[in-house]
Amino acid sequence: MAKRQKKNAGNRAGAHVDRAGGHDAVNNKTQQQSSTDAAALRNKSTSTNAQLAKLMALLRQGPKTTIELRQHVIMMPAARVFELKNKRAQLITTELLPLYDAQGIKHSNCARYHLIETPAGSARGSLTGGQV
């Protein structure tokens, strides 16, 4: 007689996965966000909304400096961060540090921006559904 495989047999740690909003729902949301972020990063538009979406996608990957953001064609990162913080209610911190640019010139107060994720694991608000 063949043994029946448990519904959550792939879960080796023994934790039960709740199908209604648990592990699968989080993974689905993460996959949707990843595809949205990938589209934003491929976008060549210089419109404000395109830059805001690109900035959010980049900050979800980790902290970014002004120099790094300019390499991604966000020419005024401080203005875009200001808009995300004040008009879109995103939690972003700014750290000032000395950095060298590609020509070896030292910039004593360059910004590094950190996106602070909410306890649910995603940034607050959405750039696709209008203002928050």
Image: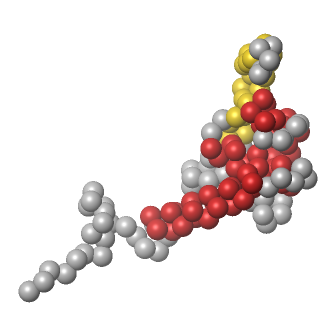
Outermost residue toward the bottom?
A: 1
Report the side of 102 relative to 6 (left or right).
right
Find residue 111 and report its horizontal and vertical position in percent: 77, 27
124 to 76, vertically: above or below: below
Residue at 75%, 54% (x, y): give it: 42
Find residue 2 and report its horizontal and vertical position in percent: 13, 83
91 to 33, vertically: above or below: above
Q: How many marks?
A: 0
Find residue 80 and report its horizontal and vertical position in percent: 85, 42
Residue at 31%, 70% (x, y): give it: 8
Q: Quarter of the image containing the N terminus?
A: bottom left
Res 23 → quadrant: bottom left
Q: Nearer the viewer, residue 46 or 78?
A: 46
Residue at 70%, 34% (x, y): give it: 64
Residue at 47%, 74% (x, y): give it: 20
Report the side of 15 relative to 97 (left or right).
left
Outermost residue toward the right?
A: 47
